[in-house]
Amino acid sequence: MVLITMAPSMHEFSAPLLSSATSSRSCSISSTSSEADDSSPPTSHHFELRDVVTTYEFSCKSLAVLSGHIGSVSCLALCGEFILSASQGKDIIVWQQPDLRQFTKFGQGDGSVKALVAVGNKVFTAHQDSKIRVWKVSTSSENVFKLINTLPTTKDYLGKFMKQSNYVQTRRHHKRLWIEHADSISCLAVYNGLVYSGSWDKTLKVWRISDLKCLESIKAHDDAINSLVACKGIVYSASADGKIKAWGKHGNTSHSLQGILEGHKDVSLNSVTVSEDGKWVYGGGSDGYIMGWEGNANFISWKLVSETKAHHMAVLCMCLMGEVLCSGSADKTIGIWKREAYGKLCKIGVISGHQGPIKCLQASPCNVGNGFLLYSGGLDKTVRVWWVPKRFAI
């Protein structure tokens, strides 16, 4: 069953702006009439101050339920005319837009897929076996998605394995080359000719797309990295250590830490997303809160501007489309939010339909009747497609 909760289609007030009451929040206003008897006490009126609640009309439509995965859906990505969905069952399904038919499958047997990104004619997939696989997209070939390499590449290995200084301690009595991840790769991001990979091994690695070479390995966090996003020259990494860290580079220099965005204490940050202009950064936590930060003009400092209790359970994923933020949760719902002044989030509606936690969201920029398409993947092994309006009536 699909349930869509929407707000009333009017500007609604929680109560009159000023209503007669006695309250701990009341203001006492005293006045004395010149005509009153001198022995009469001054009259006193008590007014309770109430907050104004803005609500919006929200009308969302369920367009399709896409089935075919043998495991829970872990990640989604746009790739030209296709939408890609990957699962813990090791399969990647290619769906044709806009008719949403299954076009092909690839990647079977290469390990549980944790993340994927598409750039140009390449698709990068991150796996539980600590590898990144690179696929070439060729619509002129029967084998549309062809595996062309695995990261780290053999060339990268051969150039480094002889030198002891290229090895790092990963566990007690165990070493690896610094170009290797030592645990599952949980997230990927792409920006300006580079691919970034975040792992449960707490490191952030930087790969050059042109030759697939690993350029950097950064000991980024004190716990697993759960999410990455890149915008305006800054890469944001969200971690189970409760922090979002901002990384930047200038020219040919290595990446350096630009700032730390602190979440709630003892709360894992599972997802991070950023507005197109790079000004607003949002992090979704295991406590159900979405935290919002405002960055300054140079992206060298950030201040906390909002804390929103978004879900009853953990926020697992988020995406932004203009001023609309979508959040997926372990409570099986999708929250739709409008970014307002100073980065505050106003709840527009809630979408229900999945039979399990929602692990991934992907918004398509294609305009469809003053709205956009939202894809959601869940532990119920389905991908659901929704139409969400871009504008909301007050």
Image (spheres, rainbow, N blue to C red):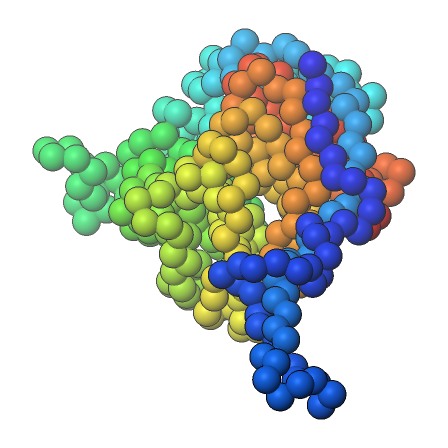
Percent x, y of residue 281 = 54, 55
Q: Nearer the viewer, residue 304 or 380?
A: 304
In the rendered image, the quadrant that contains the N terminus is top right
Q: Is residue 201 visible?
A: yes
Left or right of 192? Residue 212 is left
Q: Residue at x 17, y 45 (%)?
A: 164
Q: Is residue 250 above or below residue 334?
A: below
Residue most toward the left? 173
Q: Residue at x 70, y 42 (%)?
A: 348
Residue nearest the observer in this picture, 323 or 174:
323
Residue 222 in the image: state x and y as whole percent: 27, 47
Q: Nearer the viewer, residue 242 or 172?
A: 242
Marks counted in the figure total 0
Which residue: 52% across, 23% down? 357
Name the residue at 36% across, 30% down: 184
In the shown orientation, is residue 130 left or right of residue 323?
Answer: left
Residue 84 appears in the figure: no
Question: What is the x, y in percent for residue 351?
Answer: 67, 29
The furthest residue to the right:
369
Which image quadrant is residue 169 in? Answer: top left
Apparent side of residue 346 relative to residue 301 in the rendered image (left or right): right
Q: Residue 262: give x, y in percent of width and height.
A: 38, 56
